Image (spheres, rainbow, N blue to C red):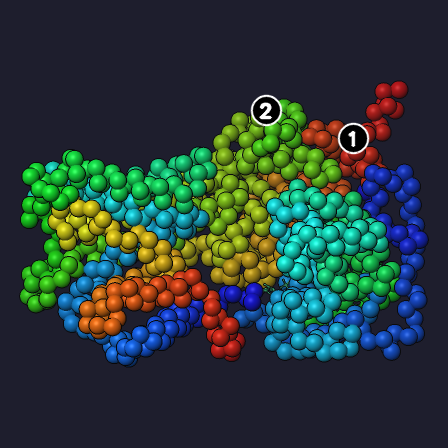
Amino acid sequence: MSNPLPLWGGVGEGAGEFRLRRMVQDAPDLIPGVKHTPAQAALGEGVDVIPPAIELRHIDKRFGAVHANRDVSLAVQAGTIHGIVGENGAGKSTLMSILYGFYQADRGEVLIRGVKKTIARPVQAIAAGIGMVFQHFKLVEPFTVLENIVLGVEGGKLIARALAHARGELARLARDYALEVDPDAVVATLSVGLQQRVEILKALYRGAEILILDEPTSVLTPQEADHLFRILGALKRQGKTVILITHKLREIMAITDRVTVMRRGEVVAERETRATTQEELAELMVGRKVLLQVSKGAARPGAARPGAGRLAVEDLSVVDASGVERVKNVSFTVRAGEIVGIAGVAGNGQSELMEAIAGIRRAAKGTVRISGGAAHGNARDLRRQGLAHVPEDRRRMGLVTAFAAHESAILGYHDDPAFTGPILLDRRAIVAHCAAQMRDFDVRPPDPHLASESFSGGNQQKMVLAREIGRDPEVLLVGQPTRGVDIGAIEYIHRRLIALRDAGKAVLLISVELDEIMSLADRILVMFDGRIVGEVQADKADERLLGLMMAGIDPRTPREAA
Amino acid sequence: MTETRLPRWAGLVALPIVNILAALLLSGLLVAAIGADPWQALLVLLRGAFGYQEAIGFTLYYTTNFIFTGLAVAVAYHCGLFNIGGEGQATLGGLGVGLVCLYADALPFYLVLPLALIASTAFGAAWAVVPGILQARRGSHVVITTIMFNFIASTLMVYLLTHVLIRPGQMSPESREFLPHTFLPFAHQALAWLGIPFARSPLNLSFFLALLASVFVWGFVWHTRWGYELRVVGANPQAALYAGISPQRNIVLAMAISGALAGLLGVNEIMGVNHRLLLNFTAGYGFVGIAVSLMGRSHPVGIVLSSLLFGALYQGGAELAFEVPRVSREIVVVIQGLVILFAGALEFLFLPLLRPFVKAA
Ligand SMILES: Nc1ncnc2c1ncn2[C@@H]1O[C@H](COP(=O)(O)OP(=O)(O)OP(=O)(O)O)[C@@H](O)[C@H]1O
Ligand SMILES: [Mg+2]
C-alpha cells in the first residue's frame, strides 16, 4: 500500500467542529468523507448593506528597491474568517503590519466598518478594534498571564483593581471561546500554544473585534492547532472577524469563508472558499501547477556507496539543564541513501536528540558515529566530518538576524578556506557564494547585502536550507524543513532532500507535519517520552498508526505477540 | 516608530549632526540664562579647540585618550559585553608602561617602545580577562565585576605609589621621572625633526598609535574570522553554539582585546606626557569612552570622529571656562553632559523629524 494521504490531503469539517487532523484522541473515527458544510451560508443577501469590517484601498508600500505591496485592495466582511495566502515574500505580513500601524503605507487608505481611519501606530489600531497575534510573541515572560493581559490598560494607579477586573473578564472569555489558561501562571513556563492563547486573550481584552493571526500554526503542535481552530470558530460565531495568514492550504479550506491570494505584492485572486480547491489556490499563488506531493523512487540504502555517509546513534541519553532526562537510551542508524523520519508529539525529546547529535548539546552518555568514525567535539568538528544541520528554529539558531544575508550564509562554515585566508575573510567570495545560494533556492529579494531580518520568514528558512544542503553533506539533520515556507518552495525543498538521499547521503528528518514525514521518509521512528517506541516502514505507515504510537501505544505489539 | 532603520547616510551623518546641534542650542540657552553671550561662548569654544596650534595639540591629545577607551568599549560591545572597566584597565596599562620605563631604561628607545606597548596591552588585557573569565565560566556580570576592578586598580596604584614605587624622600605619591631617552616624542619634537615648527603641547606620537588601533579594530571585527565569531556571540549566542563557536572563549577574547586597547591609554599618559607613574592619570576617560563608543555607533570611524568632538569639548571647554568669567567649569561640564545626553542617550530623539526627508530617497 502506498501512502494513504497526499501531502495536502483535505480533511472535511464535521458539523461545525473544526478538526484539521485526527490525532491521538480521535484516531479511531477517521472518516475519509470530504463533505464541506459552509458555516457561513447565512451570509447570503444582506452583505452589500453592511459595510465590511475592514477595507483596504490601493495600499502601496516599498522598502527601498523592494515593492512589498502594490496597489492592494481587500475587503473583509464582518463575522467571517478571511484567509490570505501567497508565496514567501508576497507581502502578506507587510500588509497586516500596515493595518496594525507597524508600518505606514506609502499610499492607500484603510476603512474600518466603512469609516476611513488613519492608523499610524498600533494604539490607534487597538482603539479601532484591531488585534494582532504575531508569530513572535510580544509577552513579558517573567510576568503572569494576568499581568500580561492588563499591561498598558491598567486604567488606574492601583494594579489590584485592574487585576481583579481582568480575572473576571478572563473567566468569561475562557468560557465563551475555549480560551482556558491559568491566569496566575508565569508566561515563561507556558507552552508555545498557551502563550499564543495569551496573545489572543490580550487582544480580546482590549476589545478587539477584528483579529489578525500571522502564520499562527507554524509554531503549534497539531493538537494545539486543532484547539486554535476551535477558538477561531467560536470567535466567528460570536460575530468577530478573523484574518488568517497561513501556508497550509487545508487550514484555509477547513475554516475560512473567503480567501485572498497574493503574489509579488499584488492581490491576484479572491475566492469563496467553498468554490475553490487547494490545487487552484496553489496554482494561483505560484503561477504554475504545483505538485502537492513530490514523488520519489524507493530508497536504495547503501547502494550508491556502501557504508558511506551513515549516522549511527548508540545508547544516547540527554539530560537537560534542570536535570530531567529528555532522551533515554536511544539507538538507531541512518544508512547511506535513506531518509529516516522521527515522528512524535512536540516535546518528547526529538529536539534534544537532534541537538545532541549536532553537537550543540552535550550527551549524558552514548555515542554518535558519522561514517563509521566516532563523532566527538562540538558542532564545528562535526561539520568537518560531513554533518550538516538545519535547526528547527531559524531565528533562534539558524541565522544571525542582525547580520547581512551573506554573513549569515557562512554561519558554521566561516573558517572554510573558500571564505577566509589565513587572517582576512574573503568578502567577495562570501558574497558571490551567497548570491549563488539565493539563485539556487529562489530567495527573494536576491540581495546578499540585505540584513537577514529583512527577509520574509519563508525566505529566511530557504537561506538556511540553501546553506546546509548546499554543502552536499554526508549526513543531514533537518528539523521542520518547511516551517513557514510556501507550497512552491516546499515542493522544491522536498525534491532537494530526495535528491540528496538518491546521491547516497543519510538524512534524518524531524517534523511536526506527519504528512511531511510520511511522504519524505523511508523509515519512521516514533519518539515518546524520550524513547524510540517503534519503527514503521513509511509505506506501511498511516496517521492512525503513527498517532497511536506517538501516544506510547503500539497497536501492533499485542497482535504480533499473540 | 518601529522602522528605526535608516539609510546609512542618515543614521551615520545626519542624525548625529542634528543631535549635536540640539545639544548646542540648549547649551546656548543655558549660557544666555546665566547672562553670557552664547554666540561669543561658541566662538571661544571653537577657537579654544581649533583656533591655534597649541589648542589643536591639546584637542588631539585628549582625542587620543578617547579613541583608546572608545575602541575598548566598542570591541566588548560587539561581543555583547558592556565593559565599563576602562578606567581600571587603563590604570593597569599605565602601570605596565611605567614599570618598563623605570626598570628597563638601560635599553635603547627602540627596545623600550615595543616593551612598553606589550606591557600596556598585556596589563590592560589581564585586568579585563579576569572579569571576562568570571563572566564566561560563572556568569558573573561584567558590568559589576569590571566596576569593582576599577576600585581594585586604583587602590592597587595607591599602594604601589605610596609603598613601593614612590621616589624616596618625596611626599607626593609618584615614581621618579623616567630617563629622557624613554619618552615618547612629542608632536612638536617630531615635527621639528621634519623642519616644521609647531607649538608645544602634550600631543605625542601615541596619536598615531590610536589611529592604528582604530584600523586594527575595523579590520579585526569586520574582516577576520575571529571578529566574525565575536560578533556572532554578541548578536546571537544560540547561533554561536549552533555554528560551533564557543561563547566562553570569545567572551574572554573580547575582554582581552578591550582591556588591551584601554591599556594603551597608559602609553599616551605615562610615556608620552607625564613621564612618571602617578595617581589618577585616567581622569575619567574610561567612562567617557562609553559615550564616545555609543555616539560613534561602535564603529572605528564614528569613534575617531566622536573622540575628536569630545577632545574639542574638553579643550575648548577649558578655554571657555578660563576666558568667559560667567561660564564656570561646572557650566562646561553641563554642556559636555548635554552633548552626551543628546548624542548618546537620546540618539533617536529626532528620528521622526528626519523621516520625511528620508522617505523621498
Ligand atoms: N523591514 C523591511 N525592510 C526591507 N524589506 C522588507 C522589510 N520587511 C519586509 N521586506 C520585504 O518585503 C517583502 C514582503 O515581505 P513580507 O514579510 O510581507 O512577506 P510575506 O508574504 O509575509 O512572506 P512569508 O510567507 O515568507 O512570511 C519581502 O521581499 C521582504 O524581503
Ligand atoms: Mg510573513
For disc 1, the marked residue is A552
Q: Residue at x 80, y 54 (%)?
A: A173
- Sequence-wise first label, 1 or 2: 2
Residue B267 visible within the image: yes
Q: Residue at x 66, y 26 (%)?
A: A328
On screen, residue B18 versus residue A461, left or right, reads left
For disc 2, the marked residue is A366
Front residue of this view, candidates B302 and A257: B302
Subunit bearing disc 1: A
Q: Residue at x 73, y 52 (%)?
A: A164
Quadrant holding the N terminus of chain A: top right
- Which structural element holds mark 1? loop
Q: Amino acid at mark 1?
A: Gly
Subunit bearing disc 2: A
Where's residue A48, x and y in %?
Answer: 86, 77
In the image, residue B165 above or below residue B284: above
Q: Amino acid at mark 2?
A: Gly
Front residue of this view, candidates A89 and A110: A110
